[in-house]
Image (cartoon, rainbow, N blue to C red):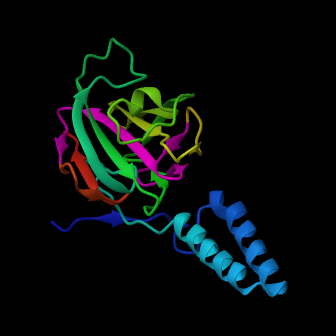
Amino acid sequence: MKAQYHIFDNERDRIPVTKEGYPFIFLGVLFTVTMALLDMAICSILGFVLTAFILYFFRDPQRIVPADPKLIVAPADGFIIDIKEVSPPEIESSNNVPYRRISIFMTVFDVHVNRAPCSGKILRVHHESGKFMAAQKPNAPLQNERNTVVMETAQGERIVIVQVAGLIARRIVFWHQEGSVVHKGERIGMIRFGSRVDLYIPTYWEIKISRGQRVRAGETVVCITT
């Protein structure tokens, strides 16, 4: 059977740069033009290179999302740094389902727009201040500044997405509210500038990725539900 995919209706005509980058792009362009008008060639070249990097960093390419509701996709671009059975944050203790954490590390060269790993309802959003240690460290999810999102799937199962700040990343953005319904592959936020996103899923879901593998938000299948 041929796999089915979908893209959002507004994907084809949108500017492939996230709105979070607009102020930085404007400042880069302003600096470059000013240096050029002042006939400061080296500074204007440096400004052009910097502006080009800003555009690259805030790029927001179209993604083709697998339509099968059983396929759970990566919430972030990057590579898998850990797959481990742990207790998820922000889920009631009465929920005795064991969970597995999939940790994705984003470098400054990855796309930083985060996407919903599945369709469902956002039950809780909780931002917590903390440290800014290197995101690869094992205790970073517990000590760093982070934003925790609890989602309920159409089948009534719960997953948790945690956006974790890092050594350089000092800005976590989430674009939805509690009670919102999101679709798989839909943009939900971003982290500046490089960090990690942890996805907590029930252990009985079938894992389809491995440690060290590179993944793409909204496209790469990380697991399959029952």
102 left or right of 189?
Answer: left
Magenta range is 180-207
Q: In the rendering, at what x and y percent does residue 150 appear? A: 44, 31
- Main SS category, magenta section: strand
Q: Residue at x 23, y 56 (%)?
A: 213
Q: In the rendering, at what x and y percent does residue 61 appear? A: 48, 69
Q: Nearer the viewer, residue 217 or 79?
A: 79
Q: Residue at x 20, y 48 (%)?
A: 211
Above or below residue 104? Residue 218 is: below
Residue 217 appears in which quarter of the rendering?
bottom left
Quadrant containing the C terminus in the rendered view: top left
Q: In the rendering, at what x and y percent does residue 198 appear? A: 37, 39
Above or below residue 118? Residue 109 is: below
Magenta-colored stretch includes residue 199 = yes
Q: Is residue 16 visible?
A: no
Residue 199 appears in which quarter of the rendering?
top left
Magenta-colored stretch includes residue 57 = no
Quadrant containing the N terminus in the rendered view: bottom left
28 left or right of 58?
Answer: right
